[in-house]
Image: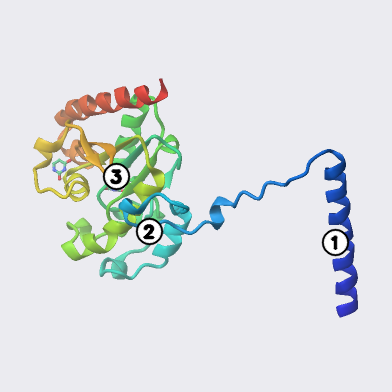
Amino acid sequence: MVDRFQKELGGALDQLRGLLEDLQRLGIEQISTAPDPFMQPLCSREPESIGGPCRIETLEEIRADLGDCRRCGLSEARTRIVFGEGHQASSLVLVGEAPGREEDRQGMPFVGEAGRLLERILFAMGLSREGVYICNVQKCRPPRNRDPLPEEIAACEPFLRRQLRALRPRVIVSLGRFSAQTLLATSEPIGALRGRWQSYAGIDLMPTYHPAYLLRNPAAKREVWEDMKQVMVRLRHEDA
Ligand code: URA
Ligand code: URA
């Protein structure tokens, strides 16, 4: 067993020596040993600490850290965690409130009736749900869709912050009162916040109404469309 291993190792070393000799004959004296970025240590999760030989964590790492989350009471009644999904390099990220019944069942954000309306809005913007990234402030469904409690928000919000830091989109659109108030740490009413550019960790943020609100108040679609037109202009500047 050990003999065979030594023989195989010897063979591999011979091959490597041959390869290096070939490279030398080709005039290649040095092989770049630039560190694999994934071998670099993670930056601290605090935004001020970016810089130096560290890297931003990936969405996969954040999802793995969330695990089978039990950090708050919402874990007891949920069926599935709804982490978020979509195009990771998208210049647009949409942030809703919390999973509803359908999202909790399927583990994906905005797959119910509000989601269908959101898809139509995206379509009108020349976008698709696959082309953007969609997530929520809360990753678990509150029972009977009640408002999340302060301790539930406190437990979940760091994961959203880390997601947005990993995604670093050009524009964030917050959907509804809860998302805007959480992201902007304000208690200003959504009617006053919507339609006005804000900043979240240096990223442009446009608050607008929630598609579920539009289902109940179709007249407000006009205002959402005004907000989305502003978003489209800013995204187009990005392409230019
Ligand atoms: N409402 C939300 O805020 N998020 C969803 O994912 C679905 C409905
Ligand atoms: N109230 C909300 O909570 N969300 C909206 O989008 C509009 C009104």
Q: Which residue type does callout 2 highlight? A: Ser
Compared with 224, 34 (above or below) is below
Could you tell me if the residues under marks 3 and 2 are in contact, i.e. CB atoms within 8 Å?
no
Tag 2 residue: 44
Residue that sits furthest to the bottom in the current view:
1
Query: Tag 1: residue type?
Result: Leu
In the image, which is nearer the foreground, mark 3 or mark 1? 1
Answer with left or right where residue 137 lies relative to residue 236. left
| Front residue of this view, candidates 199 and 181 | 199
Find the distance from the CA under tag 3 to the CA under tag 1.
53 Å
Secondary structure beneath dot 1 equals helix
Residue 152 image position (x, y, % from top left): 22, 63
**Where does label 1 land, which residue?**
13
Say which residue appears at 47% left-offset and 55% top-offset: 60
Q: Which residue is mark 3?
A: 95
CA–CA distance in space, label 2 to label 1? 39 Å
Asked whether 50 or 97 is in front, the reply is 50
* Residue that sits furthest to the top in the current view: 240
- Displayed-image quarter of ligand 2: top left
Q: Which quadrant is the C terminus positioned in?
A: top left
